[in-house]
Protein backbone atom coordinates (compact mmCIF):
# COMPACT_ATOMS: atom_id res chain seq x y z
CA UNK A 1 0.00 0.00 0.00
CA UNK A 2 1.40 3.38 -1.04
CA UNK A 3 0.68 6.33 1.24
CA UNK A 4 -0.38 9.73 -0.12
CA UNK A 5 -0.46 12.60 2.37
CA UNK A 6 -2.87 15.52 1.91
CA UNK A 7 -1.73 18.76 3.56
CA UNK A 8 -4.91 20.69 2.71
CA UNK A 9 -8.52 19.87 2.10
CA UNK A 10 -8.46 18.29 -1.37
CA UNK A 11 -11.44 17.54 -3.60
CA UNK A 12 -12.72 14.01 -3.06
CA UNK A 13 -12.67 13.57 -6.81
CA UNK A 14 -9.20 12.13 -6.17
CA UNK A 15 -10.92 8.99 -4.90
CA UNK A 16 -11.92 8.30 -8.50
CA UNK A 17 -8.28 8.60 -9.61
CA UNK A 18 -6.32 6.58 -7.04
CA UNK A 19 -6.93 2.82 -6.98
CA UNK A 20 -7.05 0.60 -3.90
CA UNK A 21 -3.26 0.27 -3.77
CA UNK A 22 -3.10 3.80 -2.35
CA UNK A 23 -3.85 4.96 1.17
CA UNK A 24 -4.80 8.66 1.17
CA UNK A 25 -5.27 10.94 4.16
CA UNK A 26 -4.08 13.91 6.17
CA UNK A 27 -2.46 11.79 8.87
CA UNK A 28 -0.67 9.04 6.95
CA UNK A 29 2.99 8.41 7.76
CA UNK A 30 5.93 7.87 5.42
CA UNK A 31 4.09 9.13 2.32
CA UNK A 32 5.52 8.39 -1.10
CA UNK A 33 3.68 11.44 -2.42
CA UNK A 34 2.08 14.62 -1.10
CA UNK A 35 -0.96 16.54 -2.38
CA UNK A 36 -1.48 20.13 -1.26
CA UNK A 37 -2.86 23.52 -2.16
CA UNK A 38 -1.65 26.49 -0.09
CA UNK A 39 0.13 24.69 2.79
CA UNK A 40 3.50 26.37 3.41
CA UNK A 41 6.25 23.76 3.15
CA UNK A 42 9.37 25.89 3.62
CA UNK A 43 9.78 24.74 7.23
CA UNK A 44 8.17 21.34 6.73
CA UNK A 45 10.11 18.19 7.62
CA UNK A 46 9.80 15.94 4.58
CA UNK A 47 9.68 12.19 5.11
CA UNK A 48 12.58 10.22 3.67
CA UNK A 49 10.13 8.09 1.65
CA UNK A 50 8.61 11.06 -0.19
CA UNK A 51 9.59 11.20 -3.86
CA UNK A 52 7.02 13.62 -5.27
CA UNK A 53 4.83 16.57 -4.34
CA UNK A 54 1.91 17.83 -6.38
CA UNK A 55 0.27 21.20 -5.88
CA UNK A 56 -3.37 21.45 -6.93
CA UNK A 57 -2.85 24.85 -8.51
CA UNK A 58 -0.34 26.77 -10.59
CA UNK A 59 1.71 28.85 -8.14
CA UNK A 60 4.38 27.09 -6.07
CA UNK A 61 5.67 29.91 -3.88
CA UNK A 62 4.66 27.86 -0.83
CA UNK A 63 7.04 25.04 -1.79
CA UNK A 64 10.87 25.15 -1.61
CA UNK A 65 11.30 23.73 -5.10
CA UNK A 66 15.08 24.22 -5.31
CA UNK A 67 15.65 22.53 -1.97
CA UNK A 68 13.52 19.57 -3.03
CA UNK A 69 15.26 19.32 -6.40
CA UNK A 70 18.56 18.82 -4.57
CA UNK A 71 16.91 16.06 -2.53
CA UNK A 72 15.57 14.31 -5.62
CA UNK A 73 11.94 15.17 -4.88
CA UNK A 74 9.97 16.07 -7.99
CA UNK A 75 7.46 18.91 -7.57
CA UNK A 76 4.44 19.19 -9.86
CA UNK A 77 1.84 21.89 -10.44
CA UNK A 78 -1.35 21.96 -12.50
CA UNK A 79 -1.10 24.73 -15.11
CA UNK A 80 -4.36 25.46 -16.87
CA UNK A 81 -6.57 23.37 -14.59
CA UNK A 82 -8.02 26.48 -12.94
CA UNK A 83 -7.63 28.81 -15.93
CA UNK A 84 -11.32 29.15 -16.70
CA UNK A 85 -12.16 29.99 -13.09
CA UNK A 86 -9.58 32.79 -12.98
CA UNK A 87 -10.68 34.03 -16.41
CA UNK A 88 -14.26 34.38 -15.21
CA UNK A 89 -13.13 36.29 -12.12
CA UNK A 90 -11.14 38.70 -14.30
CA UNK A 91 -14.16 39.29 -16.51
CA UNK A 92 -16.17 39.99 -13.34
CA UNK A 93 -13.47 42.46 -12.27
CA UNK A 94 -13.73 44.29 -15.60
CA UNK A 95 -17.46 44.78 -15.13
CA UNK A 96 -17.42 45.48 -11.39
CA UNK A 97 -14.69 48.09 -11.82
CA UNK A 98 -16.53 49.80 -14.68
CA UNK A 99 -20.04 49.98 -13.21
CA UNK A 100 -19.36 50.91 -9.55
CA UNK A 101 -21.30 47.84 -8.50
CA UNK A 102 -19.68 47.50 -5.07
CA UNK A 103 -20.30 51.12 -4.08
CA UNK A 104 -23.83 51.03 -5.48
CA UNK A 105 -24.64 47.92 -3.49
CA UNK A 106 -23.33 49.55 -0.30
CA UNK A 107 -25.44 52.66 -0.94
CA UNK A 108 -28.62 50.67 -1.54
CA UNK A 109 -28.16 49.04 1.87
CA UNK A 110 -28.57 52.50 3.44
CA UNK A 111 -32.12 52.64 2.07
CA UNK A 112 -33.27 49.79 4.26
CA UNK A 113 -36.37 50.82 6.21
CA UNK A 114 -37.35 53.68 3.89
CA UNK A 115 -40.49 51.82 2.80
CA UNK A 116 -42.35 53.34 -0.15
CA UNK A 117 -39.62 55.98 -0.55
CA UNK A 118 -37.08 53.45 -1.80
CA UNK A 119 -38.11 53.61 -5.47
CA UNK A 120 -37.91 57.42 -5.55
CA UNK A 121 -34.61 57.49 -3.68
CA UNK A 122 -33.14 54.96 -6.09
CA UNK A 123 -34.07 57.06 -9.11
CA UNK A 124 -32.64 60.14 -7.46
CA UNK A 125 -29.40 58.54 -6.34
CA UNK A 126 -28.50 56.26 -9.21
CA UNK A 127 -26.68 58.99 -11.16
CA UNK A 128 -23.95 58.91 -8.53
CA UNK A 129 -23.01 55.44 -9.77
CA UNK A 130 -23.03 55.91 -13.53
CA UNK A 131 -20.29 53.85 -15.08
CA UNK A 132 -18.72 53.13 -18.46
CA UNK A 133 -19.00 50.27 -20.91
CA UNK A 134 -16.02 48.05 -21.63
CA UNK A 135 -16.95 47.60 -25.29
CA UNK A 136 -14.51 49.51 -27.48
CA UNK A 137 -12.02 50.01 -24.63
CA UNK A 138 -8.51 48.55 -24.71
CA UNK A 139 -7.44 45.78 -22.36
CA UNK A 140 -3.74 45.16 -21.78
CA UNK A 141 -2.92 41.58 -20.81
CA UNK A 142 0.46 41.03 -19.16
CA UNK A 143 1.26 37.35 -19.66
CA UNK A 144 -0.38 35.19 -22.30
CA UNK A 145 -0.19 31.74 -20.76
CA UNK A 146 -3.18 29.51 -20.08
CA UNK A 147 -5.12 32.16 -18.14
CA UNK A 148 -3.98 35.26 -20.02
CA UNK A 149 -4.87 33.72 -23.38
CA UNK A 150 -8.40 32.88 -22.19
CA UNK A 151 -8.86 36.40 -20.80
CA UNK A 152 -7.59 38.01 -23.99
CA UNK A 153 -9.84 35.95 -26.26
CA UNK A 154 -12.89 36.53 -24.05
CA UNK A 155 -12.27 40.28 -24.06
CA UNK A 156 -12.25 40.21 -27.87
CA UNK A 157 -15.61 38.43 -27.75
CA UNK A 158 -16.92 41.22 -25.50
CA UNK A 159 -15.98 43.83 -28.08
CA UNK A 160 -12.78 45.10 -26.47
CA UNK A 161 -9.50 45.84 -28.17
CA UNK A 162 -6.71 43.72 -26.68
CA UNK A 163 -2.99 44.34 -26.41
CA UNK A 164 -0.83 41.50 -25.11
CA UNK A 165 2.69 41.36 -23.72
CA UNK A 166 4.62 38.16 -23.04
CA UNK A 167 8.36 37.89 -23.77
CA UNK A 168 8.13 34.13 -23.18
CA UNK A 169 5.07 33.46 -25.34
CA UNK A 170 5.12 29.82 -26.46
CA UNK A 171 4.14 28.72 -29.93
CA UNK A 172 1.34 26.63 -28.46
CA UNK A 173 -0.18 29.57 -26.60
CA UNK A 174 0.34 31.92 -29.54
CA UNK A 175 -1.75 29.61 -31.72
CA UNK A 176 -4.62 29.84 -29.23
CA UNK A 177 -4.82 33.63 -29.46
CA UNK A 178 -7.35 35.50 -31.57
CA UNK A 179 -5.81 37.13 -34.63
CA UNK A 180 -7.35 40.41 -33.43
CA UNK A 181 -5.00 40.57 -30.42
CA UNK A 182 -2.07 42.92 -30.91
CA UNK A 183 1.20 41.67 -29.40
CA UNK A 184 3.70 44.30 -28.25
CA UNK A 185 7.36 43.76 -27.43
CA UNK A 186 7.63 46.36 -24.67
CA UNK A 187 5.62 46.60 -21.47
CA UNK A 188 5.70 50.38 -21.76
CA UNK A 189 3.81 50.14 -25.05
CA UNK A 190 1.07 48.10 -23.40
CA UNK A 191 0.76 50.64 -20.58
CA UNK A 192 0.43 53.58 -22.97
CA UNK A 193 -2.38 51.95 -24.97
CA UNK A 194 -4.52 50.30 -22.26
CA UNK A 195 -7.67 51.51 -20.48
CA UNK A 196 -7.60 48.33 -18.39
CA UNK A 197 -4.56 46.24 -17.44
CA UNK A 198 -4.71 42.69 -16.07
CA UNK A 199 -1.73 40.69 -14.81
CA UNK A 200 -1.21 36.98 -15.58
CA UNK A 201 2.42 36.10 -14.94
CA UNK A 202 3.93 33.77 -12.32
CA UNK A 203 5.60 35.50 -9.39
CA UNK A 204 9.38 35.13 -9.42
CA UNK A 205 10.90 37.27 -6.69
CA UNK A 206 14.21 37.87 -8.44
CA UNK A 207 12.51 38.90 -11.69
CA UNK A 208 9.21 40.65 -11.10
CA UNK A 209 8.74 41.63 -7.46
CA UNK A 210 7.14 45.09 -7.55
CA UNK A 211 7.01 45.05 -11.35
CA UNK A 212 3.99 47.35 -11.20
CA UNK A 213 5.53 50.36 -9.48
CA UNK A 214 5.51 54.15 -9.63
CA UNK A 215 7.79 54.22 -12.68
CA UNK A 216 5.58 51.92 -14.73
CA UNK A 217 2.38 53.52 -13.46
CA UNK A 218 3.56 56.86 -14.86
CA UNK A 219 3.59 55.23 -18.31
CA UNK A 220 -0.08 54.20 -17.97
CA UNK A 221 -3.08 56.14 -19.20
CA UNK A 222 -4.89 58.37 -16.73
CA UNK A 223 -7.90 56.66 -15.08
CA UNK A 224 -6.61 53.19 -15.89
CA UNK A 225 -8.16 50.18 -14.16
CA UNK A 226 -5.62 47.69 -12.78
CA UNK A 227 -6.59 44.06 -12.12
CA UNK A 228 -4.33 41.68 -10.23
CA UNK A 229 -5.41 38.05 -10.00
CA UNK A 230 -1.83 36.77 -10.39
CA UNK A 231 0.17 37.43 -7.19
CA UNK A 232 0.14 40.29 -4.72
CA UNK A 233 3.92 40.70 -4.68
CA UNK A 234 4.03 41.66 -8.38
CA UNK A 235 2.48 45.02 -7.44
CA UNK A 236 4.05 47.64 -5.18
CA UNK A 237 1.09 48.36 -2.91
CA UNK A 238 2.24 51.75 -1.67
CA UNK A 239 2.81 53.01 -5.20
CA UNK A 240 -0.62 51.80 -6.28
CA UNK A 241 -2.32 53.40 -3.25
CA UNK A 242 -0.74 56.76 -4.14
CA UNK A 243 -1.80 56.35 -7.78
CA UNK A 244 -5.39 55.57 -6.74
CA UNK A 245 -5.47 58.56 -4.39
CA UNK A 246 -4.24 60.86 -7.16
CA UNK A 247 -6.74 59.46 -9.67
CA UNK A 248 -4.05 58.09 -12.00
CA UNK A 249 -5.49 54.63 -11.32
CA UNK A 250 -9.29 54.73 -11.28
CA UNK A 251 -9.75 51.32 -9.67
CA UNK A 252 -7.46 48.59 -8.36
CA UNK A 253 -9.08 45.16 -8.20
CA UNK A 254 -6.88 42.70 -6.30
CA UNK A 255 -7.34 39.06 -5.33
CA UNK A 256 -4.58 39.29 -2.69
CA UNK A 257 -5.62 41.55 0.21
CA UNK A 258 -2.99 43.25 2.33
CA UNK A 259 -3.62 45.34 5.42
CA UNK A 260 -2.68 48.58 3.71
CA UNK A 261 -5.09 47.93 0.83
CA UNK A 262 -8.19 47.06 2.84
CA UNK A 263 -10.93 49.69 3.10
CA UNK A 264 -9.21 52.07 0.71
CA UNK A 265 -11.47 54.03 -1.61
CA UNK A 266 -11.46 52.65 -5.17
CA UNK A 267 -9.48 49.56 -4.16
CA UNK A 268 -11.51 46.36 -4.33
CA UNK A 269 -10.00 43.50 -2.32
CA UNK A 270 -11.37 39.97 -2.52
CA UNK A 271 -10.03 36.95 -0.57
CA UNK A 272 -8.01 35.00 -3.16
CA UNK A 273 -11.04 33.66 -5.02
CA UNK A 274 -9.36 33.14 -8.41
CA UNK A 275 -9.47 29.35 -8.37
CA UNK A 276 -12.19 29.03 -5.74
CA UNK A 277 -14.82 27.24 -7.75
CA UNK A 278 -15.93 23.66 -7.33
CA UNK A 279 -14.94 22.92 -10.90
CA UNK A 280 -11.44 24.39 -10.60
CA UNK A 281 -10.73 22.61 -7.32
CA UNK A 282 -11.89 19.32 -8.85
CA UNK A 283 -9.84 19.84 -12.02
CA UNK A 284 -6.67 20.74 -10.11
CA UNK A 285 -7.01 17.81 -7.70
CA UNK A 286 -7.60 15.30 -10.50
CA UNK A 287 -4.70 16.63 -12.58
CA UNK A 288 -2.31 16.66 -9.61
CA UNK A 289 -3.31 13.12 -8.64
CA UNK A 290 -2.77 11.77 -12.15
CA UNK A 291 0.67 13.35 -12.31
CA UNK A 292 1.64 11.82 -8.97
CA UNK A 293 0.46 8.38 -10.04
CA UNK A 294 2.26 8.58 -13.37
CA UNK A 295 5.52 9.42 -11.65
CA UNK A 296 5.16 6.90 -8.82
CA UNK A 297 4.15 4.02 -11.07
CA UNK A 298 6.01 4.79 -14.31
CA UNK A 299 8.59 7.46 -13.52
CA UNK A 300 7.13 9.77 -16.16
CA UNK A 301 7.31 13.48 -15.35
CA UNK A 302 4.62 15.86 -16.61
CA UNK A 303 4.31 19.49 -15.45
CA UNK A 304 7.22 19.51 -13.04
CA UNK A 305 8.50 22.86 -11.81
CA UNK A 306 11.92 21.70 -10.62
CA UNK A 307 12.82 18.89 -13.05
CA UNK A 308 12.40 18.62 -16.82
CA UNK A 309 9.33 16.93 -18.23
CA UNK A 310 10.36 13.49 -19.39
CA UNK A 311 8.09 10.63 -20.48
CA UNK A 312 8.45 7.33 -22.28
CA UNK A 313 6.03 4.41 -22.82
CA UNK A 314 6.93 1.30 -20.82
CA UNK A 315 8.71 -1.25 -23.02
CA UNK A 316 9.97 -3.67 -20.35
CA UNK A 317 8.96 -4.85 -16.88
CA UNK A 318 11.86 -3.05 -15.17
CA UNK A 319 12.51 0.68 -15.37
CA UNK A 320 15.21 2.88 -13.86
CA UNK A 321 14.43 6.53 -13.14
CA UNK A 322 17.57 8.54 -12.51
CA UNK A 323 17.54 12.14 -11.32
CA UNK A 324 20.86 13.89 -11.75
CA UNK A 325 22.66 17.14 -12.37
CA UNK A 326 22.78 18.44 -15.93
CA UNK A 327 26.53 18.10 -16.50
CA UNK A 328 28.74 16.97 -19.36
CA UNK A 329 29.25 13.26 -20.00
CA UNK A 330 26.94 12.06 -17.24
CA UNK A 331 24.62 10.18 -19.62
CA UNK A 332 27.58 8.24 -21.00
CA UNK A 333 28.65 7.40 -17.45
CA UNK A 334 25.16 6.15 -16.60
CA UNK A 335 24.85 3.90 -19.63
CA UNK A 336 28.39 2.59 -19.23
CA UNK A 337 27.79 1.76 -15.56
CA UNK A 338 24.56 -0.08 -16.43
CA UNK A 339 26.31 -1.99 -19.21
CA UNK A 340 29.22 -2.94 -16.98
CA UNK A 341 26.77 -4.70 -14.66
CA UNK A 342 25.61 -6.88 -17.58
CA UNK A 343 22.26 -5.12 -17.98
CA UNK A 344 20.90 -4.56 -21.47
CA UNK A 345 19.19 -1.24 -22.17
CA UNK A 346 15.99 -1.64 -24.19
CA UNK A 347 14.93 2.00 -24.36
CA UNK A 348 16.09 5.33 -22.97
CA UNK A 349 14.86 8.92 -22.61
CA UNK A 350 16.87 11.85 -21.32
CA UNK A 351 15.76 15.43 -20.73
CA UNK A 352 17.40 18.40 -19.06
CA UNK A 353 16.26 21.78 -17.76
CA UNK A 354 18.70 24.21 -16.25
CA UNK A 355 20.70 22.60 -13.48
CA UNK A 356 18.84 19.28 -13.43
CA UNK A 357 18.15 16.34 -15.72
CA UNK A 358 16.20 13.10 -15.83
CA UNK A 359 17.13 9.81 -17.46
CA UNK A 360 14.56 7.04 -17.84
CA UNK A 361 15.94 3.63 -18.77
CA UNK A 362 13.95 0.48 -19.60
CA UNK A 363 16.09 -2.62 -19.08
CA UNK A 364 15.63 -6.27 -20.09
CA UNK A 365 16.35 -7.86 -16.72
CA UNK A 366 16.12 -7.22 -13.02
CA UNK A 367 18.60 -4.81 -11.46
CA UNK A 368 20.58 -5.89 -8.42
CA UNK A 369 21.21 -3.73 -5.38
CA UNK A 370 24.88 -3.80 -6.32
CA UNK A 371 24.12 -2.32 -9.73
CA UNK A 372 22.06 0.47 -8.12
CA UNK A 373 24.93 1.12 -5.76
CA UNK A 374 27.29 1.48 -8.73
CA UNK A 375 24.96 4.01 -10.42
CA UNK A 376 24.62 5.99 -7.21
CA UNK A 377 28.38 6.28 -7.05
CA UNK A 378 28.45 8.18 -10.35
CA UNK A 379 29.21 11.81 -9.53
CA UNK A 380 26.22 14.20 -9.71
CA UNK A 381 23.62 11.43 -9.40
CA UNK A 382 20.87 12.64 -7.04
CA UNK A 383 18.43 9.71 -6.84
CA UNK A 384 17.94 6.34 -8.52
CA UNK A 385 14.58 4.52 -8.47
CA UNK A 386 13.77 1.03 -9.71
CA UNK A 387 10.18 0.53 -10.88
CA UNK A 388 8.93 -3.01 -11.50
Image (cartoon, rainbow, N blue to C red):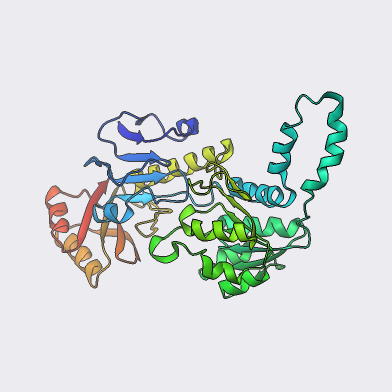
> Would you place residue 6 above or below residue 374 in this image?
above
Residue drawn 60% across and 57% down?
245
> Would you place residue 148 above or below residue 11 in this image?
below
Residue 31 relative to residue 153: left or right: left
- Residue 269's spot in the image, x, y percent? 57, 45
Is residue 362 visible from the viewing direction of this image? no
- Residue 88's spot in the image, x, y percent? 65, 47
Residue drawn 21% across and 42% down?
48
Residue drawn 78% across and 55% down?
133
- Residue 162's spot in the image, x, y percent? 69, 65
> Would you place residue 368 above or below residue 32 in this image?
below
- Residue 127's spot in the image, x, y percent? 82, 47
Comparing 251 with 302, the one in front is 251
Residue drawn 55% across and 41% down?
280
Is residue 279 visible from the viewing direction of this image? yes
> Would you place residue 8 above or below residue 297 in this image?
above
Residue 109 relative to residue 64: left or right: right
Amino acid sequence: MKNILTLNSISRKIDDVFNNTYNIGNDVEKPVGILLRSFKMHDYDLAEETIAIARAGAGVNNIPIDKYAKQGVVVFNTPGANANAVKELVLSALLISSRHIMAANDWVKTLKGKGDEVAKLVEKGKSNFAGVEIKGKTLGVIGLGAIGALVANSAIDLGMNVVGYDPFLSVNNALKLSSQIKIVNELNDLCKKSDYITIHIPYIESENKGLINAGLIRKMKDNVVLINCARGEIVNNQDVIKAVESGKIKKYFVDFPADELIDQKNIICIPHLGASTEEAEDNCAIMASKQLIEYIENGNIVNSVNYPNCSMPRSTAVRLVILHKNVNNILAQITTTIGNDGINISNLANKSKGEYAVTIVDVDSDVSDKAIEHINKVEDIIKVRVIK
